[in-house]
Amino acid sequence: MSANPAADAGLSVEPRQRAKLRRLIVATSVGNALEWYDLLVYGYFAAPISRQFFPTHDRTISLLLALGTFALSYLVRPLGALVLGSYGDRKGRKASLMLSVAMMTIGTGLVALMPNYASIGLFAPLGIFLSRLLQGFSAGGEFGSSTAFLTEHAPERSGFMSSWQFSSQGASVLIASAVGTVLTSTLTGAQIDNWGWRVPFLLGLLVGPIGLYIRSTTDETPEFERTRNETVREDVSPVREVLATQKSRVLVSVGSIALTTSANYMILYMPTYAVRQLHLAPSYGFIGTLVTGFVIMTLTPFVGHWSDKVGRLSIMLRTGLLFFVTIYPAFLVMNAHPSLATLLAPMVWIGLLKATYFAPIPGLMSDIFPLRTRATGMALGYNLGTTIFGGFTPFAVTALIAATGNRLAPGFYLMMTAALSVCTLLWARRRLGVR
């Protein structure tokens, strides 16, 4: 027997705790990555979807209709944030995560199996729109509950834990881009138009059995369990409290997310941009997004760990300013001599900046909202930001290029969102004392 049982016990507890945290990260990350995968593939295959469900004589109008449906579905995300976020604050983070992944699966199945316009006429675009609304509602509640779930299991490492929220989104970019690369490299354009675009959505149906199983094996957060009875007894509406007393925190969340969410959806739009504006092979855009997704997936947790040591704001402000001054030259490079190399280099740079700015945001948002309204507040702020600056980005960029004839319009749009985010962070430091 050891001469120091307490020390032995301490040594045995720590590895178990680390193993538990790894399981929590995997459970949340896999479910989140699979959910975001379904959202991404719609944007990646917007062109063939537009021809199947929104046929017109003008290809630009057809694409705008498909991207408009993508954008309008984001209008329901704040509603999903309020409903599922409040549910997570009342019934538990785990319960909300289980519900959101189930609804996402139904929406994905509807897209994958929906007959096209030639088969059922106007019911086809209407069906696509309704399925996107269901997906948007589901995704609206995902961020707040999953971020709260991660940070409340290890509050002292909230930056590192919550950074996996965005690392898993990078994984979803990686998976969706890999699928897109394989399909566009092996199938003809006609095959992709006729049936190939459905393959990613059929693969996305894995969200159901995998996501539900993994999340069912996790435990509720200790912080929520300690306050569950108190929350039920007080019967305070998290939605009412957020809207009445925490509006400035919501505004900080919306403004800070503008840069990163617009960049995220510009990456999503890149396969379409590469074909229509740069006149490159369809596979090139997917290769670019695949490499960018890998950069975001691998770098984000390291930056999250760094933010626990040096603070969130200093990292985000410096990266936001660097993004502002370099994003326009990045688009100049892509357009000056279009090729796979000149597409990859700017996209890798965007991925590096995005991961560095992106990683501290969940920890920052978790810090500024109290436990009793954390899932609701984060979900509302995040989804208002993604609705305004994310879901409408592909539509806005396409419309700007069509109206001005300037293929560099995306650079100006991203500069605007970067300026807004930097100003928001400066205001948050002065108004809320965020560090």
Image: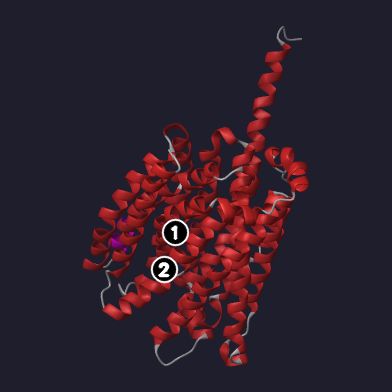
The secondary structure type at the circle numbered 1 is helix
Q: Position of 34 compared to 228: left or right?
A: left
What is the number of callouts on the image? Answer: 2
Q: Where is residue 157 drawn, in percent x and y?
A: 55, 35
| The magenta stretch spans residue 66 | no
Of pointers 1 and 2, the one earlier in the residue sequence = 1
Give 218 or 369, whichever is nearer the viewer: 369
Q: Is residue 160 above or below residue 60?
A: above
Give 315 or 108, whichever is nearer the viewer: 315
- Identify the image quadrant of the C terminus: top left
Q: Is residue 111 visible?
A: yes
Picture quadrant of residue 401: bottom left
Dominant SS of magenta comes to helix
Report the residue that reaches farthest toward the front: 244
Q: Which residues are magenta?
A: 340-345
Q: In the image, what residue type sits under mark 2?
A: Thr
Which residue is drawn at the image coordinates 31% and 52% (left, top)?
Answer: 323
Picture quadrant of residue 412: bottom left
- Identify the image quadrant of the N terminus: top right
Disc 2 marks which residue? 393
Q: Where is residue 188 drawn, in percent x and y?
A: 46, 79
Q: Are marks 1 and 2 in contact (CB under 8 Å)?
A: yes
Q: Is residue 219 above or below residue 291?
A: above
Disc 1 marks which residue? 261
Mark-to-mark CA distance, 1 and 2: 9 Å
